[in-house]
Structure formats: C-alpha cells, structure tokens
Image (cartoon, rainbow, N blue to C red):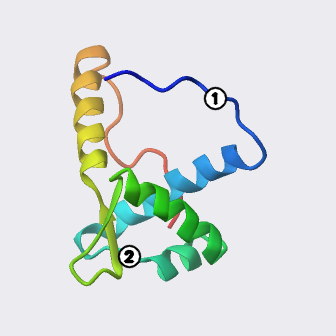
Amino acid sequence: MSLPEPTFFRGREPKAVDHSFQMLWCIAQAGPYGVTARELSQRLRMPRATTYRILKHLIAEEYVVRGPDLAVLLLGARVVEFAWLVTEGARTAAPELPGPGHGGAEC
C-alpha cells in the first residue's frame, strides 16, 4: 500500500486534525454504548456543522461506524487495526512506555 503524497496544511486543517482526535477519544471513552453526534458536539463544545463534517470523513475512512440504530457512533475497524499496530510496535521499540490513560482530551 502506497502512502499519499504529502500536502501542506491550509486554513483550519490543523484544527480539524485536533478535533478529529478529540472526537475519537470521546467516542472511545463512551465504550460499547457509543455516543450520538449531538452528544459529541455538546461534550466537545464544537459547532454541530463541524462535528458532522469531520464525522462524515471519519465514517468514510472507517475510523468511526454507526451503531445498529444509526444514531450511535462507535470506533471503527481502522482504529482497532491502528491500536494493534501501535501496541505491537511499542512492545518491540519501547517496553517502558506508560499504559492507557496517559493523555487525551477531557470528554
């Protein structure tokens, strides 16, 4: 799999990246019950339009999936795959790294 060509950030893109990670963190903290887009927007004090725009991308890339009722948001397969890769790499490269719960947005 080849990586896309690097691009330079424009306008609000760095903030969108920050918002994306905050959203993923908040969805992860919700656990198996998930969270709705409205709750996500309220908890992160983010405009609803911004929330939906970012969620649309995260869903398209399978970082977030909709629950059976289509209202609830859950972490997707790409997050699980990413976590597995990071965990395996961390065990090999730096076994002294701290465990879960170190860093992340308040939600």
Which quarter of the rendered picture does the N terminus lie within?
top left
Identity of the residue drawn at 25% across and 31% down: 85
Q: Which of 1 and 42 is in front in this view?
A: 1
Measuring from the top left, give residue 37's x and y in whole percent.
47, 77
Identity of the residue drawn at 31% across and 47% down: 79
Pointer 2: what residue?
Answer: 35
Identity of the residue drawn at 50% across and 51% down: 21
Q: Is residue 33 above or below residue 7?
A: below
Q: Which of 88 and 7 is in front in this view?
A: 7
* SS label for mark 2: strand
Hey, what amino acid is under mark 1?
Answer: Thr
Q: In this view, does 24 lie above or below 72?
A: above
In the rendered structure, the answer to whether residue 4 lies left or right of residue 48 reads left
Measuring from the top left, give residue 52's x and y in whole percent.
54, 70
* SS label for mark 1: loop
When asked about the image quadrant of residue 67, the answer is bottom left
Q: Is residue 1 above or below residue 48?
A: above
Q: Which of 33 and 20 is in front in this view?
A: 20
Pointer 1: what residue?
Answer: 7
**Disc 1 to disc 2, C-alpha distance:** 32 Å
* Furthest residue toward right: 11
In the rendered structure, the answer to whether residue 106 lies left or right of residue 98 reads right
Measuring from the top left, give residue 56's x and y in whole percent.
47, 63
